[in-house]
Amino acid sequence: MTYVIAQPCVDVKDKACVEECPVDCIYEGERSLYIHPDECVDCGACEPVCPVEAIYYEDDTPEEWAEYYKYNVEFFDDLGSPGGAAKLGNTGKDHPGIAALPPQNQD
């Protein structure tokens, strides 16, 4: 099990979760953040600090955003397990499912 970053993060990327993560497993894509499923220690520190409520425990992800689990996992297919997001910075890419989304309105 792991935590998942869902649609509310797209085009927001607040990064409060990145600062809170004790294992540096939240990676930055072009339009969204992603939690590495193998590096996450399931501590839950990221969830309460997310200002847009985009982070969910895998089993608690709302049905409307269920595909975001797959997006988070598959984002790392090419990237592998770098062992920490800080040294990478923005990867400059997104999962195709997120890249295909229209721009998200920021109210």
Image (cartoon, rainbow, N blue to C red):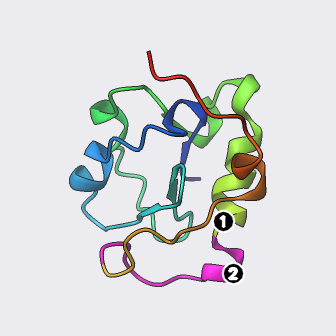
Could you tell me the amino acid type at mark 2? Asp
Is 26 or 15 nearer to us in this picture? 15
- Between the residue at mark 2 and the residue at mark 1, the CA separation in whole angstroms equals 7 Å
Looking at the image, residue 89 sits to the left or right of residue 57; the answer is left
Q: Is the residue 59 above or below the residue 87 in the image? A: above
Is 31 or 44 nearer to us in this picture? 31
- Magenta-highlighted residues: 76-86
Residue at screen point 53% across, 82% down: 81
Image location (x, y in percent) of residue 26: 41, 60
In the rendering, which numbered label is found on residue 22? none
Looking at the image, residue 23 sits to the left or right of residue 54; the answer is left
In the rendering, which numbered label is found on residue 78? 2
Residue at screen point 23% across, 50% down: 20
Dot 1 corresponds to which residue? Answer: 75
Image location (x, y in percent) of residue 42: 42, 53
Q: Is the residue 34 above or below the residue 67 in the image? A: below
Image location (x, y in percent) of residue 105: 54, 23
Residue at screen point 44% across, 15% down: 107
Q: Residues within 10 Å of mark 1 (few under 14, many from 20)?
A: many
Residue at screen point 52% across, 65% down: 36
Q: Is the residue 45 above or below the residue 74 in the image? A: above
